[in-house]
Image: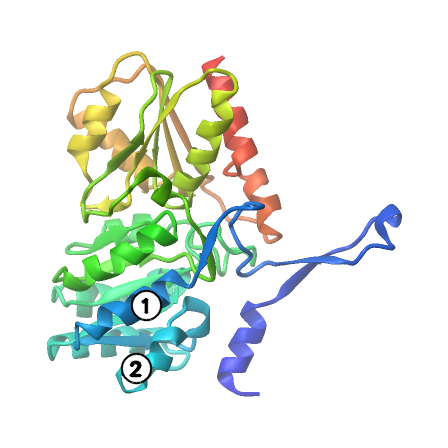
Amino acid sequence: MAPGARRARCREARMTASPTPAASAKPRLTTSAMIASIAGEGQRTKPAPFGHALVEAARTRPGIVGMTADLGKYTDLHIFSKEFPDRSYQMGMAEQVLFGAASGLAAEGFTPFATTYAVFATRRAYDFIHQTIAEENRDVKIVVALPGLTSGYGPSHQAAEDLALMRAMPNMVVIDPCDAHEIEQIVPAIADHKGPVYMRLLRGQVPLVLDEYGYSFELGKAKLLRDGADALFITSGLMTMRAHEVAEKLKADRIEAAILHVPTIKPLDEAAIAAAAAKSGRPVFVMENHTVIGGLGEAVAATLLRHRIQPAAWHHIGLPDAFLDAGALPTLHDRYGISVDAVTARVKAALG
């Protein structure tokens, strides 16, 4: 079996739910532990926004090249490779080689977009990124699939601590997009930014949410999506999507929640965070698809301390400081408190 087939077979493992006796006549339901969709039932989606956006960016930016470590199909880079085969590099199952080569291409004036899974960039190739890309301030864009708890395949593939690791690296811009609309805007923005970028990726059929707010991405800027007097949600990534759904549910109880979306984790928009949190009388809920250690929550807490802001109450919703279980994503999101229902229940309990 070819190496690519081996990896695909391993990382696309299916987890099958056994039917109950009463449901035995019905078709068996399966859910992918690796890349199950995070879209809710009936939610609007867009296919492969990163791959298509990179193709469009590359049409007017001849220096863009695509690189991957045997995961082009699973990071949507295969769309770019089909359009620009002479500007695409398959490095095999060798993430350290991937980032070393990307640094070399950047040194020669190219803009590499290097894709892999988040765990392989942040854990397997961290030193190569640190020494050959960040220290040299090379123009490499690191785009990673399966961030946080978006894989049910267990600790080997769950990048629950990736933001903490990359935030600590000098020169590194760190971005956590919410949806397809934002990813499409981020790609040309980071292509034009000179220097290393770490971008989390939602791939496949990616939900659409932010277009409902007329949102536009700006590197380093947080955006207030909606205002509300009863609570403030400070969020990034897919948790902004969840915050939107939670806020809609809370309206039925006449609870109005504000949402401050913070896609750029580093550099952090401290001014926007401080301004939103300074509004008196409403508790702050930071929500992130990341361990509670070292991510958005602790960055926001440090910001409020520096600006001497004390909100009415402080709540941090994130993944525990633990190795997470394997299983189907809906089950895991409920178990670890980042599903819509789990977050709604926690907010209601906190508000009394």
Spot occupied by residue 207 in the image (x, y as percentages of width and height): 45, 50
Q: Tell me which residue sits at (18%, 70%) in the image.
A: 132
Colour mode of the rendering: rainbow
Q: Which residue is mark 1?
A: 125
Instruction: Determine whether 99 is above or below 91 in the image.
Output: above
> Depth check: 283 or 190 in front?
190
Image-based side of 201 in relation to 66, left or right: right
The residue to which callout 2 is attached is 84
Q: Nearer the viewer, residue 310 or 96?
A: 310
Let me know if residue 126 appears in the view. Answer: no
Which secondary structure, mark 2?
loop
Most foreground residue, 283 or 118: 283
At x 55%, y 32%, the residue is 342
Left or right side of 269 for 322:
right
Q: Quadrant of residue 282?
A: top left
Image quarter in which the N terminus is found: bottom right
The amino acid pointed to by label 1 is Ala
Vertical relation: 143 (above or below) 321: below
| Placement of 272 over or under 310, stated as above or below | below
Q: Is residue 96 left or right of residue 73?
A: left
Q: Which mark is residue 316?
A: none
Q: Residues within 10 Å of mark 2 (few under 14, many from 20)?
A: some
Q: Are marks 1 and 2 in contact (CB under 8 Å)?
A: no
Label 1: element kind: loop
Disc 1/disc 2 C-alpha distance (Å): 26 Å
Measuring from the top left, give residue 137's x and y in whole percent: 12, 64
> x, y (%) of residue 41?
58, 46
